[in-house]
Image (cartoon, helix red, strand yellow):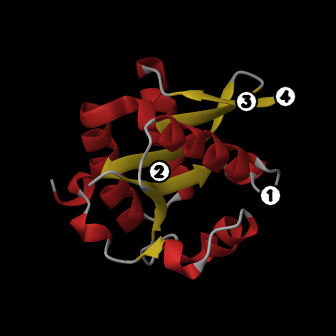
Amino acid sequence: MTFVRPFQLSDYASLTNLLANVLSEVCYEETITAFARQLSLDSDLVLVAVDNQQTVGVIIGTIHNNEGYYYRIAVDRAHQRKGIGKLLIQGLKQRFEQRSVSRVLISVDMHNEPLLPLYESLGYKSRDFMRSVEQLRIVNG
């Protein structure tokens, strides 16, 4: 049974390994920096998916100017196409709603462009895609 929960410090090693295994080298370098910044700002916007006591997915979100952003999502290759990405997105959306953000956006770059159909399947439209990721403080510091 897969469930989503908030990030815990004990997840750090397994999540960095997951990110290294799933993301390209360039994407990993960009993501690990943003991940560290987000942990220092607000670790409650980093959620992990666990299946049989194994970390199988992560979503990193952030809030910038009262807007919630899905920054990066990664699911272990052996667990992809099993609904884990949707669980992570829905879990983070609940966090954004609890924080009363003005709107929720998907930060889009060359690394997550292939995931746009996943977000569209959850009701997001092209107006919800923000392509200037570099303006987020977790990206540019």
Disc 2 and disc 3: Cα gap in Å? Answer: 22 Å
Q: Earlier in the sequence, mark 2 or mark 3?
A: 3
**What's the CA distance linking mark 2 and mark 1?**
19 Å
Residue beneath disc 1: 81
Foreground mark, 2 or 4, reads 4
Secondary structure of the residue carrying numbered label 3: strand
Residue 26 in percent (x, y) is at 36, 67
Identify the residue at image location x=68%, y=71%.
120
Q: Which residue is mark 3?
A: 3
Amino acid at dot 3: Phe
Give left or right: position of 112 versus 141: right
All told, the count of numbered labels is 4
Which residue is more in the foreground, 29 or 137? 137
- In the picture of the structure, the residue carrying the numbered disc 2 is 20
Q: Nearer the viewer, mark 1 or mark 3?
A: 3
Q: Which residue is mark 4?
A: 1
Give me the C-alpha separation between circle 2 and circle 4. 24 Å
